[in-house]
Image (cartoon, coloured by chain):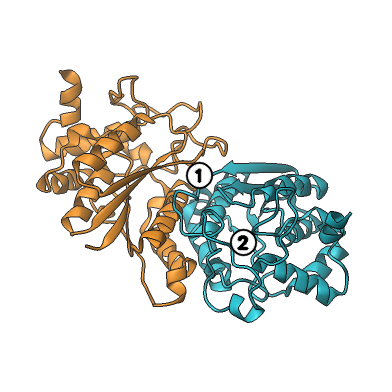
Chain colours: A cyan, B orange
């Protein structure tokens, strides 16, 4: 089995990506980050998701992006609530964390090199998204090109590292349908930027609104919402 | 004054780069990393260097690259000693740390974004070097291209981020001459991969050998060696 690295937040998107990587036959090492996010509850979910969906290994990397500042996800800036879908795609929101995907993918590159993996999976997408620059296809392509000049393997045997973005052109509803077809149980995934102390989704941040819209389009109730109603 | 980020290990190369950035009129934020290096002594030197050579701010970022493994600088693998200069450039040595420059530059990118800096300085060079893939010009160019697609600024006002590599085509001797012309005091810089408990250079790792060769070519004694003889 070929090794792959999958970035895993424990959210709806990255959990679906893990299921896709598994379905493609990869032996998956999942990487999560304790980066000072206010929604660190997602790390507990990531652990459950990694275990439940068959990651061979789950690594949580401690980094501190709070010191850099500049984001509502790592500081006291308020997470925007109840925004219209139009305003979500109007510019880069305050929940953007400076260079976060670049930092995450850099660690994935290090692990890929050590494990001899040629494949990195990341759940970025550009349709139902929040305007993050480091989710765009041209960004991912540029990262892949750089990665193939960065490593020891790149200097020798023509090993080629690929960044897989299986969700990049999908709507949230399409992502959910894809995950359901692969048996993903979305009740254990956490998407909210500003969850309650018990992890309950706020229901009104951009991430919750996009998730809710996705489930509404699929025509089923979000199993996560159902589980908190019990 | 324009802000710049300078990656600073406290070694000969990065200290010279800091002096160059200052001489070019930048307000410099120096970034160092506590990444699990066995030669963590260099961080004390970095602090002294940042203070002595006028960095406006010095940030030490805690990251752990030991868990990834795969390098003599972060594990129990022996640091090679007394290698010939020819063998140093024959392949990638065990002191290579997987994706290290990519991770370091990613943090620099985050800080650049938050500080509104368009300029990142890094002391890579390809002449008297140890064969690291992530020191090559084509790697740096690819990182710069990626960086200009990664950030919020890149999506709006055409802000352009530049990765400065003023040493990339210089020999160690030329680097030393450049530094001396800018008033760099090399007695406070630390280059050794495997220093003694008091920080004394081993004199036989690749980094010490290249440094010694540089000072020999310049025709002066290394002030660091002199300081340890006292």
Question: Mark 1 packing: few (<14 Cα in 10 Å), some, or many (20+)?
Answer: many
The chain carrying label 2 is A
Quarter containing the C terminus of chain A: bottom right
**Element at badge 2?**
strand
In this picture, residue A20 sits left or right of residue B90:
right
Residue B138 can be seen in this image: no
**Residue receiving disc 2:** A163
Q: Secondary structure at mark 1?
A: loop
Q: Which residue is mark 1?
A: B98
Q: Position of residue B4 (x, y in %)?
A: 29, 58
In the image, A103 versus B94, the foreground residue is: A103
Q: Residue at the spot x=54%, y=62% of the render? A: A144
Give percent across and percent down for residue B229.
Answer: 17, 19
The residue at 75%/55% (across/down) is: A200
Seen in the picture, residue B189 relative to B173 is either above or below; the reply is above
Q: Are marks 1 and 2 in contact (CB under 8 Å)?
A: no
Residue B173 image position (x, y, % from top left): 18, 43
Residue placed at 82% from the left, 58% from the top? A224
Count of picture labels? 2
């Amino acid at each position: 089995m070929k090794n792959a690295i999958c970035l895993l937040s424990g959210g709806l998107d990255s959990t679906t990506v893990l299921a896709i990587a598994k379905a493609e036959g990869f032996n998956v090492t999942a990487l999560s980050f304790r980066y000072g996010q206010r929604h660190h509850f997602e790390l507990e979910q990531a652990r459950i998701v990694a275990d439940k969906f068959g990651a061979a290994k789950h690594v949580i990397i401690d980094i501190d992006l709070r010191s850099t500042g500049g984001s509502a996800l790592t500081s006291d800036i308020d997470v925007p609530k109840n925004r219209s879908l139009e305003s979500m795609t109007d510019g880069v929101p305050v929940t953007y964390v400076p260079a976060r995907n670049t930092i995450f993918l850099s660690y994935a590159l290090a692990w890929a090199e050590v494990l001899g993996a040629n494949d990195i999976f990341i759940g970025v997408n550009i349709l139902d998204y929040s305007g993050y620059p480091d989710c765009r296809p041209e960004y991912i392509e540029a990262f892949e090109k750089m990665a193939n000049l960065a490593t020891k393997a790149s200097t020798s045997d023509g090993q080629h590292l690929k960044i897989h973005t299986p969700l990049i052109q999908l709507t949230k509803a399409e992502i959910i349908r894809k995950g359901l077809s692969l048996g993903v149980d979305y009740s254990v995934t956490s998407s909210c930027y500003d969850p309650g102390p018990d992890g309950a989704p706020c229901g009104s941040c951009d991430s919750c609104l996009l998730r809710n819209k996705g489930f509404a389009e699929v025509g089923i109730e979000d199993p996560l919402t159902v589980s908190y109603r019990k």
